[in-house]
């Protein structure tokens, strides 16, 4: 590989948030664009002809009609649930008890954890996802497996040991002390190592005692550059359970807030059934909420208020929530976000959907300026989409009268077949994408 590589194709970048300014100002599409990659970073983005002339020494890869964008960023996932995705017939609490917890118990075995981590990153990369923010399990081995596998592939990734000291089965319970101490040891080992980052991870208030939440709040205060990830107001039964467990709390968010777990760098998955006070505090604190639309429809949780939350200035990311979510694909996730928007009376523009899956999730994870866009200086995590990847998509895209109309069928009907190539840290994955054989090994 040459030192400088020039990728040619259609390109899509974002100069601003398309929820805040008109799409034409927010998005920058080039019919014949180019991305110059050098030393793992994006060195330039521009017109193909111009960049070819300025950089005659660059090695060229021409993707023709392929669409080059930032790789997708999945801001909330559970890699240990890879093997139980698409498990039938339950609502949240029963789904956790019936499928999730029995599977998570198995991650005490480091070999199992390593196998699932490898499968998980094969799948996410094959779907064009270059960064995830994942829950692990209570076992430090599950975190070791996650970070080791991400590091081997050169991925920017965030993960954390899931903490639970009550309302969980034997074998999946820790204590306030072990949650704090084992999380701290993992932070010291992995946070900031290469491209890896740590998220302090209380699973959700029902499975943490006040003492545990307090211990993790203290840990976050000691390591404020870590993220904090958890769940918030996903299902109505869950919200009622939290009210019974924390009678002194003003609302669900307060069960985190009172223990120092609300602030910039906090990521709250789902956040569907929010009260006005919770919305106000989330925004004031600069915390992020993460929309998990395939999970919210699959588990029957409810309809996220994207339009309202964005209009009031909340930070919002987009995520699969695998395996509560029913797909590893951020394209399928964008489609579900569109459908949920329609059910709430707002049709999200393709530019808004794409922004959420890239730059919006990067902002939520405090990684804007590093990943999530095509811009000079950013790390070169890229995806190249085929906008005619199936006969159904191709025949619709052929009738498109503008770029957004050409992109939208891939958002609505695309999957891993639409992923032509994936670049991680300036390197193309062999075989065009993650692949079933282990991708970047
Ligand atoms: N709430 C607490 N744990 C989980 C989980 O693993 N998945 C989902 N969707 N919600 C949760
Ligand atoms: Zn989740």
Image (spheres, grey):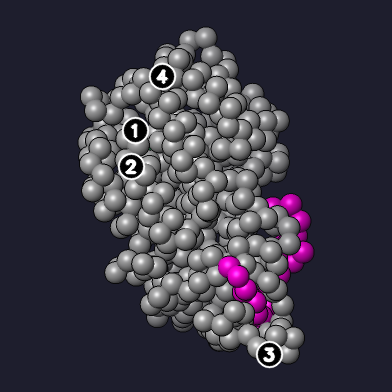
Mark 1 close to ligand 1, CB under 8 Å: no
Q: Which mark is residue 138?
A: 1
SS class of the residue under badge 1? loop
Instruction: Give the magenta-colored segment's residue range.
Output: 19-40
Which residue has dot 4 on it? 176
Asked which quadrant contains residue 406, the reply is bottom right
Q: Residues within 10 Å of mark 3 (few under 14, many from 20)?
A: few
Q: Residue at image x 41%, y 49%? A: 147
Q: Secondary structure at mark 3?
A: loop
Left or right: where 214 falls relative to 307: left
Q: CA distance from mark 1 to mark 2?
A: 8 Å
From the image, tell me which residue sits under label 2. Answer: 142
Foreground of the two, 313 or 308: 313
Q: Dot 1, how many residues are within 10 Å of its Cα: few (below 14), some (14-19), or many (20+)?
A: many
Determine which of the numbered discs, if any, sits on residue 20 in the image.
none
Q: Is residue 37 magenta?
A: yes
Q: Which residue is the site of mark 3?
A: 56
When the figure is inspected, residue 39 is found, relative to residue 300, above or below; the finding is: below
Q: Residue at 45% of width from left, 15% of height from top?
A: 211
Q: Tell me the SS state at disc 4.
A: helix
Sequence-wise, the earlier of marks 1 and 4 is 1
Decide if residue 18 is in sight here: yes
Work out whether mark 3 precedes mark 4 in sequence or the reverse, and give the earlier one: 3
Q: Earlier in the sequence, mark 3 or mark 1?
A: 3
Between the C-alphas of marks 2 and 4, the distance is: 19 Å
Of residue 51 and residue 258, the one placed in the foreground of this image is 51
Residue that extends furthest to the top in the rendered view of this protein: 248
Marks 1 and 2 in Cβ contact (< 8 Å): yes
């Amino acid at each position: 590989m040459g030192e400088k590589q020039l990728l040619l194709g259609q390109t899509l970048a974002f100069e601003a948030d398309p929820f805040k300014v008109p799409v034409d100002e927010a998005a920058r599409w080039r019919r014949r664009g180019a991305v110059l990659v050098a030393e793992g970073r994006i060195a330039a983005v521009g017109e193909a002809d111009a960049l070819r002339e300025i950089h005659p020494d660059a090695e060229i890869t021409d993707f023709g009609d392929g669409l080059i964008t930032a790789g997708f960023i999945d801001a909330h996932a559970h890699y240990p649930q890879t093997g139980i995705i698409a498990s039938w017939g339950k609502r949240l609490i029963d789904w956790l008890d019936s499928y999730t917890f029995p599977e998570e118990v198995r991650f005490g075995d480091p070999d199992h954890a390593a196998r699932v981590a490898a499968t998980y990153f094969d799948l996410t990369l094959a779907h064009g996802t270059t960064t995830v923010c994942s829950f692990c399990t209570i076992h430090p081995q599950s975190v070791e497996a996650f970070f080791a596998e991400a590091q081997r592939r050169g991925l920017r990734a965030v993960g954390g040991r899931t903490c639970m000291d009550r309302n969980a089965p034997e074998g999946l319970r820790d204590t306030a002390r072990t949650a704090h101490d084992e999380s701290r040891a993992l932070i010291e080992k992995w946070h900031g190592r290469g491209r890896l980052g740590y998220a302090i991870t209380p699973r959700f208030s029902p499975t943490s005692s006040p003492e545990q939440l307090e211990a993790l709040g203290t840990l976050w205060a000691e390591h404020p550059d870590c993220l904090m990830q958890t769940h918030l107001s996903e299902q109505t039964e869950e919200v009622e359970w939290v009210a019974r467990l924390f009678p002194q709390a003003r609302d669900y968010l307060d069960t985190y807030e009172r223990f120092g777990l609300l602030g910039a760098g906090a990521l709250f998955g789902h956040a569907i059934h929010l009260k006005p006070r919770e919305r106000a505090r989330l925004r004031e604190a600069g915390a992020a909420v993460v929309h998990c639309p395939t999970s919210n429809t699959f588990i029957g949780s409810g309809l996220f208020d994207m339009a309202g939350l964005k209009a009031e200035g909340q930070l919002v990311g987009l995520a699969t929530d695998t395996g509560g979510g029913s797909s590893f694909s951020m394209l399928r996730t964008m489609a579900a976000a569109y459908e949920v928007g329609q059910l709430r009376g707002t049709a999200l523009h393709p530019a808004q959907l794409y922004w959420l899956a890239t730059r919006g999730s990067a902002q939520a994870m405090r990684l804007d300026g590093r990943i999530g866009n095509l811009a000079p200086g950013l790390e070169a995590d890229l995806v190249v989409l085929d906008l005619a990847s199936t006969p159904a998509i191709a025949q619709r895209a052929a009738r498109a009268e503008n770029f957004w109309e050409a992109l939208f069928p891939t958002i609505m009907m695309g999957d891993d077949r639409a992923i032509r190539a994936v670049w991680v840290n300036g390197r193309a994955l062999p075989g065009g994408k993650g692949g079933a054989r282990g991708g970047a090994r």
